[in-house]
Image: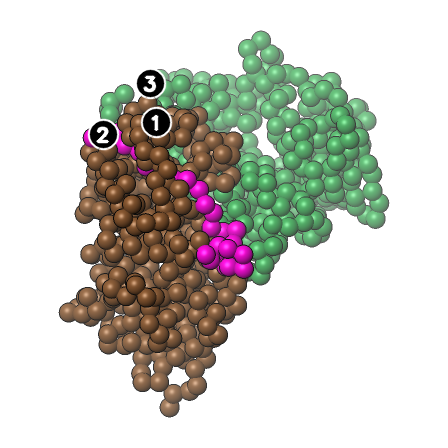
Amino acid sequence: MARPPDYDVAVLGAGIVGASAAWHLARRGMRVVVIDASGPAAAASGASDGAVSVASKKPGVMARLANRSLAYTRRLAEAGGPLRGVFGDRPSYYLATSPAEEQALGDLVAKIAALGGPARVTADGAKAGPDGVGPSVTRCVALAGEGHMLGYAAVAAYLAQAGVDRLWPVTVEALEADDAGVTVSLTDRNLRVAKVVAALGTSSTALFPGLPVTPRTGQLVVTDRAPPGSLPGPLTAASYLVAKSASPGAPDKPPVVIDPLSTGQFLIGSSREEHGDCARTDFATVRRLAARAAEFWPALRARHVVRIFAGVRAAVSDGLPIVGPLTQSPRVVLATGFEGDGICLSGLMGREVAAMVAGEAVSAGAEADIAALSPARFSRREARAR
Amino acid sequence: MAEPRVLIVGAGLAGLAAAVGLARAGFASLVVDQARAPGGAIHRQPLPGVAAHGLPAQRRRWQNLRAEVTAEGDRIEILCNHRFAGIDADGVALLTGERSRFIRPAAVILATGATERVVPVPGWTLPGVTTVGAIQTQLKTTGEPPAGRVLLAGSGPLLCAAAAELAAAGNPPVAIVEAGRPFRHAADALALPAGYLAEASAHLARLLLARVPIRCGMHLSRIDRHGDTLVARAEGGGRHLDFAVDRIGLHDGIRPNGYGAAGTTVPVALAGDAREALGARAALEDGRRAGAALAARLAGRPVPPDMSPALERERAAQQRLRRIHAHDLGARLVAIGDDTVLCRCENRTAGDLRALGGDPTDRELRLRGRFAMGRCQGRFCGEWVRRLQGDDPADAPLGAVRLPVRPLPLADLIDAGEPDEEN
């Protein structure tokens, strides 16, 4: 009955997590096909600011995994690695303008110390920010060791070096797992594969309707070019750390991040909206972001907005990504729900997912944290392949 | 906030005609324009103290329209020196300028005219090389033609019209390089409406008098700068000519400038060249039509058809003009070398496009290619990227068109206040 597999693994989703998984799988000698409904970096990976940040992660599992992934990503960027020239080192700054935000920065300093590197605090105080920070900033924490990696560039680099087959735009209609493999139903034909990695982000629920993944929109502003280097690294409002750690809701002051691009442009983000419409942008929201951003970095007032856009992040009900084999269909490994943390976590997650597909143990020391991401935690409403 | 009005963007022929059409049906409008004075591209008003330009018939057409606007009193407000940044998903429009503000219009009419096409050649981004329209703008606002030797190149009836205007202003171009062979299409030319023929004859008579050579069947293959001089090479028919000049105007027809018409909650309509590039005669007619049609839609009455016999005549005439100027655009594009800039906003070349390999998605063209990611969002390079990719038709935008419709000073966005504040 079952024909021999066309591929060892089908990776569904050509975002940064899928691309990293594909590269790690191909490196193990597996025959891999990457399938996407539209193309590479078509959703959150292509709409992100590219910050590889540990500071912004929720304390606990996420901060530990992000820290491990940051260290691993730095290795992938060394000579001969797939991310050479894609990941770059840069300082990062976290700013407070109120006592509550100052308190959040205190928590940040403690969190970074507990993680023990590679990120470290290089300065802390009212004057610790880069030149040009606005006068209402009362405390700044400067970090070294974090970095920057544009999502679409990382996807392109992983795919170029993985030597995998690519299929897009192709929609996966259904997955059917049996004892010998998985049948991947495409619109016009079926593929037979031994295993599947589903890194589908916000599209996950189309194939796995039980997963508690919802799209969360963020609007961003792109400016024209200032002389490159006027801001050495991203400025993040401390309220962003609070927003990421607390349940969603609209804080009084938008949790803004100002990210300097290598072109001299700035990316100002982002809102967090529950409607999940990635085509929806509105002036009121971006005006509040812009006003807050200009408070932190007054030179922005001289820039022009060239583009406002929205992206969607795949948010999970309990705030943790979903990574691991399905209990009912262990040939299908999920890697989704990163909600804006995929850029930072993609390096490590690609490696761990490849280990799971190969039937090997995950990285020593990370077992418990990775187990916490297992889809089994939703087992009562098991996310079964349709 | 006052009762919502219709926002009309562009105070040229189409925009003001639309305002009159709306006012006569009982709807008030606010007409916003970036220029100092109404007029648009065709009736661009001279700076104070500079004599008015244009043929008497054209001036009368404009004065009549201004009188119709005046007769409507406070149903039409014109706001100059302000720019439309776009209308968002909540139906909030942003106007920037001396006093930036958010408004909630009942509907929007974009009467934003056309933009010029320029086929990219090596050197088209050099200082001293502009569109022919930019030379006309300089002439209309200052009354002065550009100094020194001027070369006009590309294709279309505007080349001869602008050359005649330059001749009338005392500095005829050294030559016109026209890619088509318009003088070989006598039958089509004679079938043009009388007004077109009269205008063309007047232009040609002036060019003849000023001894301006028209090199047909040739196009520029590159432009170089040697010191203060631009050297343009024209090729065609197996020969080439070099021109040493001070200023070059390029023009390969026009395309509608209807950006900003998507993604909102209120009706958005297009009028004039922004809807279909049919020229000045059609703009007046189409503005009236758009105003009346929107009024009907807002009042819940049946909407009249979007074409009239007069507009059909203009469309047929424009098609005839395109046939008269037809030439092998594909041959010009095939010759585009890897070092030719396609996107001047981000300085992206044909080589950058080709380096993306096989069949990039629109997303890859944007993210990895950086095409349509600059200040103009691909208004100018999009067609050439599409054509070099072999896409036909070539007018689909490279991905979604984003707010703002033009670069928006961040300070203006912040200073506009909250959208629903009284200001």
Residues in magenta? A75-99
Secondary element under disc 2, as helix, strand or loop, is loop
Left or right for B82, reference B345: left
Which residue is found at the position 55% from the left and 27% from the top?
B41
A88 is within the stretch colored magenta: yes
State which chain disc 1 sits on: A
- Chain B on-screen colour: green
Q: Amino acid at mark 1?
A: Lys
- Residue appearing at x 37%, y 27% in the figure: A133
**Foreground pick, A350 / B22:** A350
Work out whether mark 2 precedes mark 1 in sequence or the reverse, and give the earlier one: 2
Residue that badge 3 annotates: B74
Q: Which residue, given by chain and number where applicable, does mark 2 sit on?
A: A98
Q: Amino acid at mark 2?
A: Ser
Q: Chain of mark 3?
A: B
Pair 2/3: label in front? 2
Judged from this view, the residue extending furthest toward the left is: A380
Q: Is residue A381 above or below residue B265?
A: below
> Relative to residue B49, is residue B224 depicted above or below?
below
What is the x, y in percent for residue B371?
A: 53, 46
Tell how many labels.
Answer: 3
